[in-house]
Amino acid sequence: MALGLVASVRAWLPIRSLGAVNVYVHPAGDGGVHLVDSGIYSARSIHDIVRGVRALGLDPRRVERIVATHFHVDHLTGAALIAEATGAEVLLGRRDLEVALAGGDPGEFIDAAIKLFVEHGMPRGEAEEIRGSHPALRAVEAYRALSRLDIKPLAEGDTVRLGETRYRVLEMPGHTPGHIILVAEEEAYAIVGDLILQGITPHVTLHNPQTDPLGDYLSSLERLAALNLKLALPGHREPIHEPASRAMEILRHHQERLEEIIRLLQARGPQTGYQVARQVRWRVRYKSWEEYPPPERFFAMGEALAHLRRLEATGRVEQVERSGATLWRAAG
Ligand SMILES: [Zn+2]
């Protein structure tokens, strides 16, 4: 896909439901190459980018700038390899930089998620199985390499030049705490990472119980819808020609899921997050929880907790402790 001064290259991913990540390539006037997102920390993914850049008549050794829309493995970790080979500068939303790279060892991130899931009722054995199969675990080396680089933080309102295009940075948290999008104001399009996708709803999880990522995400969707963009270039799948209506569709999907969870708590009484995760009718092809592969259980559990936290933040559910377990119940 080529849109004036930006083209996209599809880079392989080991995540079957996504297939590939879109890397947006901008030719800079002097033969340099600027990228948005960078594939996963894997030779196969990087090979796709090298071939794709070359097919556009550009020199992949001349990658000079990489902006990552968010810190997830499929968007950021390829930059560890590309930056090492080319000396390219790497830029990331300031909040994602703090959360994923400036804290403790990147491996601790997964430990914290596992601990939270166990507190919310997931059996320890199941949680450990998830740890072993989490895609971020395979990329811990890449996060370590990235934390040694001098990554530049991007903040709301910054402008960044990629090729011939000036983009405005907007902070759109939710999918990650520091997810950014890049708006080409004159051209009325934006590179949106995983803020909205066609056909699938971006994952929203709870890492830190003090935060309300789904609340952030719903606000970001409303904000995107109000931008009046003609086109959104997403991190996966095809370009989105009516970004506002897709954003509102995803918003309604979460509102329906919030209502489903409230009804479930009203009908069944207090439940752990794990019990909720098992009962929500996720749009998956598995008939029972036992059929879910471990990474899918990880997503379902994180998604259930994000929804419960949203309901708590809006006063509709509350947490209760019962014999050492954390349960959620409908308020009032
Ligand atoms: Zn992604």
Image (cartoon, grey):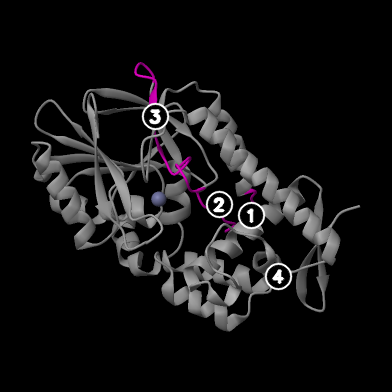
The outermost residue toward the bottom is: 125
The percent coordinates of residue 186 (x first, y second) are 35, 16
Q: Which residue is mark 1?
A: 306
Per the image, label 3 sits on a secondary structure element best described as strand
Q: Quadrant of residue 283?
A: bottom right
Q: Which residue is mark 2?
A: 204
Mark 2 vs 3, N-terminal side: 3
Under mark 2, the amino acid is Val
Q: Which residue is mark 3?
A: 190
**Residue in the picture at 59% in, 72% down:** 115
Mark 2 or 4: in front is 4
Under mark 3, the amino acid is Ala
Asked if residue 241 can be seen in this view, the reply is yes
> Where does the magenta region start and end?
185-212
Q: Quadrant of the N terminus?
A: top left
**Residue in the picture at 49% in, 20% down:** 228
The percent coordinates of residue 284 (x first, y second) are 54, 61
Mark sitting on residue 202: none
Mark 4 or 1: in front is 4
Label 2: how many Cα within 10 Å (few below 14, some 14–19, many 20+): many
**Residue 312 falls inside the magenta stretch:** no
Badge 4 vs badge 1, beta-carbon distance below 8 Å: no
What is the CA distance from the residue labelled 4 to the residue labelled 3?
A: 39 Å
